[in-house]
């Protein structure tokens, strides 16, 4: 698929006002995930837990009512093999990561194909209401020639969304939390911003709104940090990833803290910067919350 067309198709259904339809389900995932992490008695690999949460978000956004834990687990396994192969030598022979990645791509297509077929039939029969999942929007979209997307295009868009909303968001989440934890002054300012949002909220309002997300100016700084790129290098699905990060930070800053096991742990750089211990830590619920 041509790059410009590909980028437009990925961004269109998950940008701007379209994000509002995903906000509630994203927030529910974040609230439940943080509660689960804080209830664990043992030390966790924080970076890996962030990947699990981000993966769950993008799969719920994509599949929605068709979300099936068994299928999603298989998709996650295949996606991991595909991701690892992206940073390996392109040797298509048994035993090599690249070969494994090509097989994983075929598995992904087989796993998602039935979901696409089922949803296409539901749309045809008028069984999809106003609350649409990403897969519904993609199936109804038309390209610049007025043609509906082929199943192959939708598979490619799902994989792209997984890369954008899974790996990028998970890495940004891990570094945002660890950075704030290491710098109490910045942590205090970020928390105060979230507390201000809560103070101005109506008593009857129970969940975040897009307007509140837009008020999170401090979380968008420093402006020199651009995890999603700019211009032609803008990460497809960046709006969704930013929303995911904002929602997580909101609830984390108000209710939790991170206690790292190895604060001075070295960082490896490939394929992306990460702590070599996967950021061993405990997520602790703040007393009185």
Image (cartoon, rainbow, N blue to C red):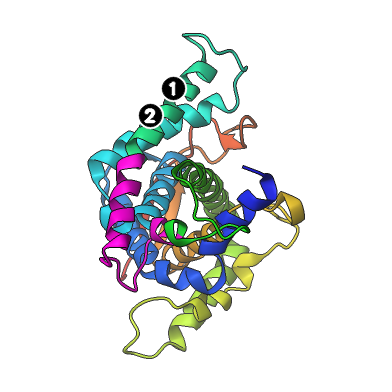
Q: Is residue 14 left or right of residue 67?
A: right
Q: At x 36% / y 76%, what residue is drawn?
A: 207
* Residue at left offset 49%, top offset 81%: 197
Dot 1, crowdedness within 10 Å: few (<14), some or many (≥20)? some
Q: Is residue 199 magenta?
A: no
Q: Is residue 26 left or right of residue 187?
A: left
**Hey, which quadrant is residue 208 in on the image?**
bottom left
Residue 213, horizontal then vertical, whole percent? 52, 74
**Left or right, 155 with reference to 39:** right
Return the x and y of residue 132 as percentages of the image width and height: 36, 66
- Looking at the rendered structure, the secondary structure element under dot 2 is helix
Q: Secondary structure at mark 1?
A: helix
Q: For residue 259, which numbered disc appears in the image?
A: none
**What span is in magenta?**
113-137
Residue 81 position (above or below residue 161): above
Estimate the x, y position of residue 99 in percent, counting from the top left. 50, 16
Give the residue drawn at x 45%, y 30%: 105
Q: Is residue 163 visible?
A: yes
Main secondary structure along the magenta-highlighted residues: helix
Q: Residue at x 49, y 24 (%)?
A: 101
Residue pointed to by mark 1: 103
Q: Residues within 10 Å of mark 2 (few under 14, many from 20)?
A: some
**288 or 159, nearer to the observer:** 159
Q: Is residue 121 magenta?
A: yes
Residue 237 visible here: no
- Which x, y percent locates residue 229? 70, 52
Number of numbered callouts drawn: 2
Q: Which residue is mark 2?
A: 107
Asked whether 224 or 72 is in front, the reply is: 72
Q: Is residue 48 above or below residue 164?
A: above
Q: Quadrant of the N terminus?
A: top right
Task: Please say if the residues under marks 1 and 2 sit with CB atoms less than 8 Å apart.
Answer: yes
């Amino acid at each position: 698929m041509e790059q410009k067309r590909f980028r437009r198709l990925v961004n269109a259904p998950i940008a701007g006002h379209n994000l509002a339809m995903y906000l509630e389900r994203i927030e529910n995932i974040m609230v439940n995930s943080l509660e689960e992490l804080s209830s664990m008695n043992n030390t966790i690999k924080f970076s890996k837990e962030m990947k699990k949460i981000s993966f769950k978000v993008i799969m719920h956004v994509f599949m929605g009512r068709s979300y099936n834990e068994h299928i999603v687990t298989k998709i996650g396994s295949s996606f991991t093999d595909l991701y690892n192969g992206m940073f390996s030598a392109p040797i298509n022979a048994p035993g090599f990561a690249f070969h494994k990645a090509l097989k994983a791509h075929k598995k992904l297509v087989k796993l998602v194909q039935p979901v696409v077929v089922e949803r296409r039939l539901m749309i045809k029969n008028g069984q999809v209401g106003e609350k649409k999942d990403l897969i519904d929007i993609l199936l109804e979209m038309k390209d610049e020639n007025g043609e509906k997307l082929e199943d192959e295009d939708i598979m490619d868009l799902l994989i792209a969304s997984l890369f954008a909303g899974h790996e990028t968001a998970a890495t940004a989440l891990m570094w945002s939390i660890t950075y704030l934890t290491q710098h109490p002054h910045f942590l205090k300012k970020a928390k105060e911003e979230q507390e201000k949002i809560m103070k101005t909220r109506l008593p009857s309002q129970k969940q975040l709104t897009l307007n509140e997300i837009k008020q999170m100016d401090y979380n968008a700084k420093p402006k020199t940090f651009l995890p999603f790129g700019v211009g032609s290098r803008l990460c497809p699905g960046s709006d969704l990833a930013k929303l995911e990060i904002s929602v997580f930070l909101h609830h984390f800053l108000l209710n939790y803290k991170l206690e790292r096991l190895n604060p001075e742990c070295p960082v490896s750089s490939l394929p992306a910067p990460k702590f070599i211990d996967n950021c061993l830590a405990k997520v602790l619920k703040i007393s009185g919350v």
